[in-house]
């Protein structure tokens, strides 16, 4: 079965860098049989990137979206806008959105609703910070993020959902989760989604990714893990060689 690899370029690449990276990815990674690649360029470069990857197996994601359908919301980008430029996915509630822009679970819930109304698959990011981890609150933090972020969504349980578990303390650094810890994270996510919707929903529609300081060396242990359906990378997705190393590490 194909596992998912999301490359979140954040605000790190120019238009020309995005285009040249997408060209190399299309040429050398898009045909991989074991990896389904999803690229998340900055908004202004979605269109250019989509022109390059079009016709390949690579998909496009927005890094964020507005919690409203349309209207006078200067500076915002709607789910329909993302769909129109070729996105099939949208990242929602990334730790940097929660941290720098004070996004709470309520707002994230509205954004999830918008993604589904537009026919996009949400990639919901969840994860505890270092203080919460030290206090052994990971389970309760994830439970709250899932319950409050995903409750009463009209499109579920029919629509697909991707949950990216990204512990805040692991993002953009060197430390990442020990892969064997993914089993209990997976079970926590499963329990909460089963309570909210159903076990059938979880088994058939939900994929669980890991993200946080994954590179080519660490990737294989996550790819091989039965409780990981894929990876979300930041830093490792910014140049071709490091992204390629992550992708080829999946040998299953
Ligand atoms: P990182 O970023 O791979 O650089 O840790 C992951 C993320 O922010 O999603």
Image: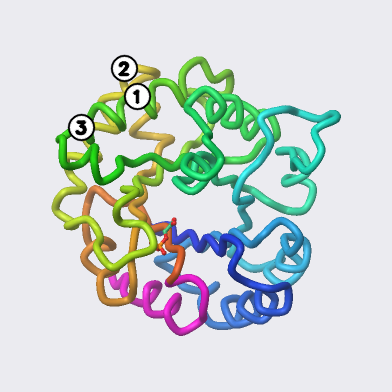
Counting from the top left corner in percent of width and height, residue 80 is at: 76, 38
Helix, strand, or loop for circle 1?
helix
Front residue (pair 73, 229): 73
Q: Quadrant of residue 220?
A: bottom left
Circle number at residue 89: none
| x and y, in percent, of residue 103 in the image | 53, 34
**What residue did someone put label 2 on?**
195
| Mark 3: secondary structure | loop
Residue with the mark numbered 1:
144
Are circles 2 and 3 on residues that touch, CB within 8 Å? Answer: no
Residue for point 39% across, 29% down = 145
Q: Element at badge 2? A: helix
The disc at residue 137 is: 3
234 or 49, which is in the foreground? 234
Question: CA separation, marks 2 and 3?
Answer: 19 Å
Provide the residue span drawn in magenta.
236-252
Residue that extends furthest to the right in the rendered view of this protein: 72
Classify the position of the N terminus by image quarter.
Answer: bottom left
Q: Earlier in the sequence, mark 1 or mark 3?
A: 3
Label 1 and label 3: CA atoms lie apart by 11 Å
Which residue appears at 44% of the width and 61% of the height?
A: 5
Which SS does the magenta portion mostly show? helix
């Amino acid at each position: 079965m194909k596992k998912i690899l999301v490359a979140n370029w954040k605000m790190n690449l120019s238009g020309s860098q995005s285009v040249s990276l997408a060209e190399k990815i299309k040429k050398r990674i898009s045909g991989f049989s074991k990896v389904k690649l999803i690229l998340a360029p900055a908004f202004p470069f979605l269109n250019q990137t989509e022109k390059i990857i079009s016709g390949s197996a690579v998909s496009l994601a927005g890094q964020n979206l507005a919690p409203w359908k349309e209207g006078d919301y200067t500076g915002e980008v709607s789910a329909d806008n993302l769909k129109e430029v070729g996105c099939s996915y949208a990242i929602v509630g990334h730790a940097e959105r929660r941290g720098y822009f004070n996004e709470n679970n309520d707002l994230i819930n509205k954004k999830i609703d918008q993604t589904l109304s537009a026919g996009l698959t949400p990639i919901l990011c969840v994860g505890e910070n270092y203080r919460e981890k030290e206090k052994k609150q990971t389970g309760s933090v994830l439970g709250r993020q899932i319950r409050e972020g995903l409750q009463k969504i009209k499109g579920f349980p029919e629509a697909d959902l991707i949950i990216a578990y990204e512990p805040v303390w692991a993002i953009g650094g060197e430390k990442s989760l020990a892969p064997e810890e993914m089993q209990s994270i997976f079970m926590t996510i499963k329990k909460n989604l089963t309570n909210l919707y159903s076990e059938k929903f979880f088994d058939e529609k939900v994929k669980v990714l890991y993200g946080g300081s994954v590179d080519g060396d660490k990737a294989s242990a996550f790819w091989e893990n039965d409780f990981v359906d894929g990876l979300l990378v930041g830093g490792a997705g910014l140049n071709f060689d490091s992204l390629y190393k992550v992708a080829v590490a999946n040998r299953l």
